[in-house]
């Protein structure tokens, strides 16, 4: 059911489309139905129907039914009735209750034994507003009485109906036809089917849940944030159970799929989006944002590293170090033992093993060879205002500080580019190239080597 209004979100977006983790609220519910291998998933839309249907369209096994106007939960199910195969079991879920575990629902389905109605219930310290579970002397359920229709005595009952039920469809269909709206809210209450079940001599069982998060709905931004934390807590727990060390599980946000090999450590306030894989022994410093990236074994990402892999992705090779304050954009491919330091931006570029760009630099559309040293303040001028061009920096080149490499250009292997040069023509391997006004190459020039001792 996803037809309700949700005005207290103060949002132009339908409530069920608000994001929790990496998905809309209603998507969590649909995904749970998928885990249960639901034969048929029917989404009842009403308020914001077009937006909800557009957001969910194209998913296999999903059908939409519109409820216009919204005359209650029973009325909602009446609209869905023609779409329900009569030989199945109908499980009623709410589009704004995202964190129900598949195991809980499977247990509820099992409790029907294929022939009786089963309700998911919860004992609450403050049950006001909810439908109360009225039980018979033998403990079986007699009725659900909505708060507004309940007597004072019934209002003292702390067991409430969670909004989730499982019921054999061939029993449900005729009961839906018997619903009336002669109640306090003049709505067709789905909960009235319990009365019909009991009147027809059917047992109604209740499964009492102890974990309220599983049936918690979202009506306000505060509740949305609470469930986001609960969701993140589950993800953090799963990671720690696999052996990932989180400095503080309360300060982690996973909005996608994060997979980790052995011995991974993640500091506080990191956000993971899309598909992220961290290899063995990887260290992630505080305040990193990682989206669509593969990080290989032993790599270290220092504080405030920002990686946005986008559709092409980013890869970080083994034992490579990045940051603090580095930015990797789509198509950055770093080999083994690469060093990317502070305020370095890399886009659509390959850095071979041992290459270094340690400070304040830009590499865009570049192929950088092994052991290249790329100086502070240097940039690739990869865009001429209309097209992008490649810069090739062959192995062992040293690019001094404040160089502008005007693409397309190739810097020959082992060469040195003097600081402050603007290079717009290819350079000779092994040469020292100086370009201030005019580009001059000095062949057979020897780069100074480190003094011994
Ligand atoms: C309902 C139950 C109540 C239970 C509570 C748990 C009824 C009559 N009452 O209360 O016993 O304790 O849930 O949260 O069922 N919806 C529609 N169409 C409608 C009305 C509602 O699709 O015409 C959907 C809503 O979008 C929501 C769900 O049904 O996803 C529940 O509706 P809501 O108004 O939140 O529940 P209550 O009626 O207050
Ligand atoms: Ca209502």
Image (cartoon, grey):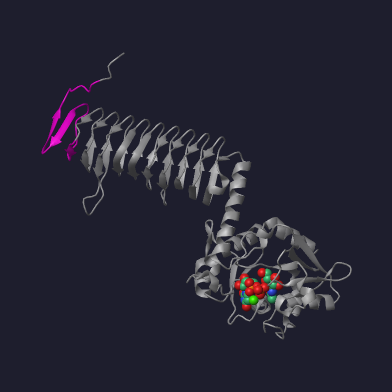
In the rendered image, residue 378, in percent from the top left (x then y), is placed at 25, 39
Q: Quadrant of the N terminus?
A: bottom right
Rendered location of residue 354, percent (x, y):
37, 30
Relative vertical location of residue 262 with respect to residue 47 in this rendering, above or below: above
Comparing 354 with 216, the one in front is 216
Q: Residue 421 sits in which quadrant? A: top left
Q: Tell me if 416 is positioned left or right of 11 in this view.
A: left
The residue sitting at the top extreme is 453
Q: Please, is residue 164 above or below residue 419 in the view?
A: below
User: Would you say 401 lies left or right of 61 here?
Assistant: left
Is residue 37 something that shows in the picture? no
Q: Where is residue 366 in the image (x, y as percent from the top left)?
A: 30, 41
Q: Specify the quadrant of the image occupied by residue 398.
A: top left
Q: Is residue 431 magenta?
A: yes
Quarter containing the C terminus: top left
From this viewpoint, which residue is outermost toward the bottom? 182
Which sits in the foreground, 217 or 155?
155
Q: Who is closer to the viewer here, 174 or 279?
A: 279
Question: How many numbered discs, if any?
Answer: 0
Measuring from the top left, give residue 404's x and y in whole percent: 21, 41
Is 345 magenta? The answer is: no
- The single residue placed furthest to the right in the displayed view is 138
**From which residue to which does the magenta span run?**
420-448
Q: Which residue lies furthest to the left in this view?
A: 438
Can residue 145 be seen here? yes
The residue closer to the viewer here, 56 or 134, is: 134
Residue 287, quarter of picture: top left
282 is higher (above) or lower (below) than 414: below
């Amino acid at each position: 059911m996803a037809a309700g209004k949700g005005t207290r979100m103060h949002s132009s977006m339908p409530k069920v489309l608000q994001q929790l983790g990496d998905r809309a609220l209603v998507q969590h519910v649909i995904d749970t139905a998928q885990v249960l291998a639901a034969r048929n998933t029917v989404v009842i839309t009403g308020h914001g129907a077009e937006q909800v249907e557009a957001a969910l369209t194209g998913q296999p096994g999903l059908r939409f039914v519109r409820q216009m106007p919204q005359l209650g939960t029973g009325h909602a199910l009446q609209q869905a009735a023609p779409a329900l195969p009569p030989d199945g079991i109908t499980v009623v879920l709410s589009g704004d209750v995202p964190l129900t575990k598949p195991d809980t629902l499977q247990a509820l389905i099992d409790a029907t034994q294929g022939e009786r109605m089963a309700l998911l219930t919860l004992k609450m310290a403050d049950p006001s507003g909810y439908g109360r579970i009225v039980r018979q002397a033998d403990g079986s359920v007699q009725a659900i009485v909505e708060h507004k229709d309940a007597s004072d005595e019934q209002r003292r009952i702390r067991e409430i109906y969670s909004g989730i039920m499982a019921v054999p469809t061939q029993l449900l269909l005729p009961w839906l036809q018997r619903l009336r709206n002669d109640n306090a809210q003049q709505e067709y209450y789905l909960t009235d089917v319990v009365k019909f079940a009991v009147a027809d001599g059917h047992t109604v069982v209740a499964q009492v849940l102890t974990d309220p998060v599983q049936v918690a709905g979202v009506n306000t931004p505060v509740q949305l944030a609470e469930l986001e934390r609960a969701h993140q807590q589950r993800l953090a727990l799963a990671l720690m159970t696999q052996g990932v060390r989180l400095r503080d599980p309360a300060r982690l946000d996973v909005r996608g799929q994060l997979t980790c090999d052995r011995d991974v450590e993640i500091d506080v306030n990191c956000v993971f989006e899309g598909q992220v894989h961290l290899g063995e022994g990887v260290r992630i410093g505080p305040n990193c944002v990682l989206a669509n990236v593969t990080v290989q074994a032993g790599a270290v990402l220092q504080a405030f590293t920002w990686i946005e892999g986008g559709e092409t992705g980013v890869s970080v090779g083994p034992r490579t170090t990045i940051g603090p304050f580095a930015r990797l954009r789509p198509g950055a491919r770093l080999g083994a033992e690469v060093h990317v330091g502070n305020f370095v931006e890399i886009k659509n570029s390959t850095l071979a093993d041992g290459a270094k760009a340690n400070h304040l630099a830009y590499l865009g559309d570049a192929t950088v060879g092994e052991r290249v040293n790329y100086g502070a303040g240097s940039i690739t001028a990869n865009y001429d205002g209309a097209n992008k061009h490649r810069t090739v920096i062959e192995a062992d080149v040293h690019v001094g500080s404040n160089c502008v490499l005007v693409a397309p250009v190739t810097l020959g292997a082992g060469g040195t580019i003097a600081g402050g040069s603007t290079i717009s023509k290819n350079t000779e391997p092994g040469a020292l190239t100086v370009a201030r006004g005019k580009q001059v190459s000095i062949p057979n020039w020897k780069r100074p080597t480190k003094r011994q001792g």
